[in-house]
Amino acid sequence: MKDRAAAYEPLTVERLGALLVGVDETRRWRLVAEFLEEYRWEPAGDRAGLLDAEPALVGDEHWDVFLAALAEHLAAKDGRGAPPWVATRSLRQFWFPFNTRAARVDAVVHAPAAFRRRGIYVAAQELNVA
């Protein structure tokens, strides 16, 4: 019997959410970087499908909201509206994932609208990790 290599399937935001459960912050950022890299390589017409399915809750409100902001941000960059599931996720208190004085100033000035609206202050260049 022949071994068949599994067909490549890009990471979806739903799968990304599942991978974020129970791992440390460093691993989470690496997974986000991997998702962003795969997203960038997908044809523009296929990208919406990577954002459509709502991820289950990660167990950390910051990251649950981050996924919604990320989905909205990427959809907007592609000229599309956000998936409906993102509307219900926002923070009650601001979050600065990179919490140094310089990073905070940069994030306040340069955070994409989808993140600011939800109380997450992360500079746009932090999302260009790949």
Image (cartoon, rainbow, N blue to C red):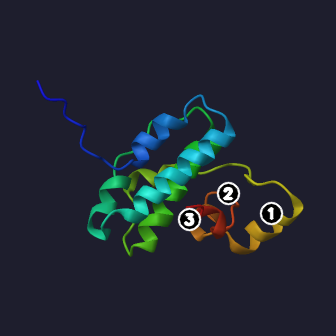
Label 3 element class? helix
Mark 2 or 1, nearer chain start: 1
Residue 66 horizontal side relative to residue 8, left or right: right
Element at label 1: helix
At a point 62% along the width and 36% down the height, the residue shown is 60
The kind of residue on which mark 3 rests is Ala
For the image shown, how many numbered marks are present on the structure? 3
Quadrant assignment, res 108? bottom right
Q: Nearer the viewer, residue 94 or 111?
A: 111
Instruction: Report whether 49 appears left or right of 92.
Output: left
Disc 2 secondary structure class: loop
Within 10 Å of disc 1 (Cα), the crowding (few <14, some 14-19, many 20+) is some
| Mark identifier at residue 114 | 3
Horizontal placement of 110 versus 46: left or right? Answer: right
Q: Which residue does the numbered mark 2 point to in the structure image?
A: 119
Q: Quadrant of residue 107?
A: bottom right
Circle 3 residues within 10 Å: few <14, some 14–19, many ≥20: many
For marks 3 and 2 on the same chain, the one whose residue lies earlier in the sequence: 3
Q: Position of residue 4 (x, y in %)?
A: 19, 34
Query: Which residue is farthest front?
Result: 2
Residue 89: horizontal and vertical position, in percent?
Answer: 54, 49
Give the CA separation, mark 1 to mark 3: 18 Å
Residue 103: assigned label: 1
Foreground mark, 1 or 3, reads 1
Q: Amino acid at mark 2?
A: Gly
Which residue is at a point 38% across and 68% down the rendered structure image?
81
